[in-house]
Image: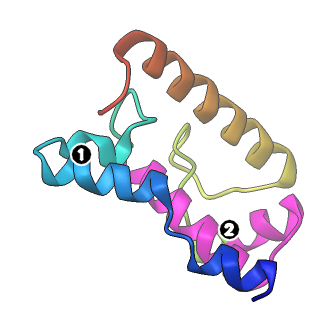
Amino acid sequence: MSDQNTAAAKPDAFKARMAEAQAAGRPELAHQSLGRALSEDEHALADALMEAYSEGAESQGALAKALTAKGVARPSSGTADWTAKNLGEELKALNTDLDQAYQDHGFGA
């Protein structure tokens, strides 16, 4: 059996542990790294980024173009005027805010 087949056959211990905890009444572990819930705009941005990646976008410029074309609002301003620069700034600000929320509240938002 090749290493690739062996790795594919191994269960994911982390996912199994999270599933056990959730089944035992700890649903907050589904979002264990969040110190707060995401806003609607943040969810929309995350979904749109995943869609853009799946469509082949690789650079911040390509991602910004896709977000603008889809009319995705920037969580910080509510506008859909994406550029490579403000995409980077937006992601950095969101990460900083989520890190602070995690520090303030721990996991399980």
What x and y, as percent, mark residue 65? 78, 70
Determine which quarter of the picture holds residue 6. Answer: bottom right
Seen as rendered, the residue at the extreme left is: 25
Q: Nearer the viewer, residue 22 or 56?
A: 22
Amino acid at pointer 1: Ala
Along the line of sight, the residue nearer the viewer: 72 or 20 = 20
Q: Secondary structure at mark 2?
A: helix
Query: Magenta residues, as a range?
Result: 39-66
Residue beneath label 1, please?
A: 21
Q: How many marks?
A: 2
- Amino acid carrying label 2: it is Thr
Q: Where, quadrant-wise, is the C terminus in this rendering?
A: top left
Whether residue 24 is visible: yes
Give the percent coordinates (x, y) of residue 41: 44, 51
On screen, 32 above or below 12?
A: above
- Which of the 4 quarters of the picture holds residue 8? bottom right
Q: Tell us which disc is closer to us: 1 or 2.
A: 1
Q: Residue at x 79, y 78 (%)?
A: 3
Rendered location of residue 108, percent (x, y)? 30, 33
Res 57 label: none
Give the structural element (helix, strand or loop) at label 1: helix
Q: CA distance from mark 1 to mark 2?
A: 39 Å
Q: Residue under circle 2? A: 68
Residue at 52% of width from left, 16% of height from top?
100
